[in-house]
Image (spheres, rainbow, N blue to C red):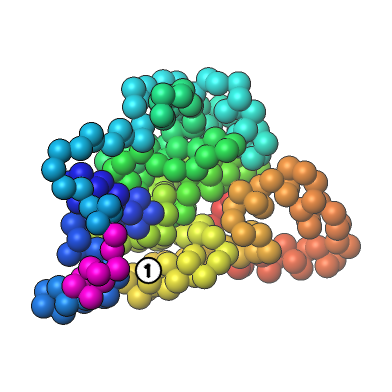
Amino acid sequence: MNTERNLWYDFGAGKGGNIIALAQELYASDSLPYLLERIAEQAPRVRPVSFSFGKQPLSKPSFRQLEVVSLSSPALLSYLRQRGINTELAKRECREVRYLTNGKPYFAIGFPNRSEGYEIRNNLFKGCIAPKDITHIQQEQPKATCYLFEGFMDYLSFLTLRLERCPDRPNLDRQDYIVLNSTSNLSKAIRPLGGYGRIHCFLDNDKAGMEAVQELREEYGLRVRDASHIYGGYNDLNDFLRSKKSGQHEHQQQRPEPEKGQRQAEQLKKKNKGIRM
């Protein structure tokens, strides 16, 4: 909230504007007379100190003296290893972002989006440097398939799992990738996804993830495949990876009998046709 300019911005939803735009979101209406009435109703309850009249010192931006460098911090690399992420892959996909907040220096993993903003994360903080947007990773040659992820940790988890399972031929460039950087950005991904014949969704196993898949199916029908069953029982792909790393994964704990295992493998192959981890 910028009280000097009387503007707001919701980084999670990727929306912002003036008080009218805020009222549109709060009251789910585009009728200006109706919105003005609602604002007038709330005016007596608003303390005058909440507004900015006359000249006052401008508030300092959250991130100052921003510096983007190669990812090399031992602390950040250690954090990634704790999340089960292959650090060499992370160095390729991410950057290290250094900045000042309230005069104090901080640093975090930075994952760039298509609008030159960054999703930033360390072991204590998760946020973004505006503008917030999706990340669209395209290969040199056009691809018919796109893998969709909610956050960049899930994207890095996928790359890590694929490299571990197929170290000689991981084929990481066989498809394009889109990282939403929040399910609230789904609308921004609709148009770029339209160019793909197959869309594989690796979203969270929660209500927001399921609703996003359903919205995509309404838009693109059978082109959309839900891959979340691969990590069923886990909240997201990174939870699945960390469990696997810690030796708690179900398939590591229980070894099926040959006949039963063969039948399960055949069923899984049919179920996951077209989707490889």
Frontmost residue, 48 versus 71: 48
Residue for point 65% across, 64% down = 232
Q: Position of residue 262 (x, y in %)?
A: 78, 63
Frontmost residue, 234 versus 92: 234
Q: From this viewpoint, is residue 227 visible? A: yes
Residue 251 position (above or below residue 78): below
Residue 19 position (above or below residue 214): above
Q: Position of residue 243 (x, y in %)?
A: 73, 49
Residue 43: in magenta span: yes
| Amino acid at pointer 1 | Leu
Q: Main secondary structure of the magenta part?
A: helix
Q: Which residue is mark 1?
A: 216
Residue for point 34% across, 27% down = 64
Residue 137 sits in which quadrant?
Answer: top left
Q: Secondary structure at mark 1?
A: helix
Number of marks drawn: 1
Is residue 10 shown left or right of residue 75?
Answer: left
> In this picture, which residue range is highlighted in magenta?
39-47
Residue for point 67% across, 36% down = 82
Residue for point 62% across, 59% down = 235
- At label 1, counting other C-alpha atoms closer than 10 Å, the crowd grade (few under 14, some 14-19, many 20 or more) is many
Residue 251 sits in which quadrant?
Answer: bottom right
Residue 18: in magenta span: no
Frontmost residue, 187 versus 255: 187
Q: Position of residue 225 (x, y in %)?
A: 47, 66
Q: From this viewpoint, is residue 185 visible? A: no
Residue projecting furthest to the left: 33
Q: Position of residue 92 (x, y in %)?
A: 47, 28
Residue 78 position (above or below residue 20): above
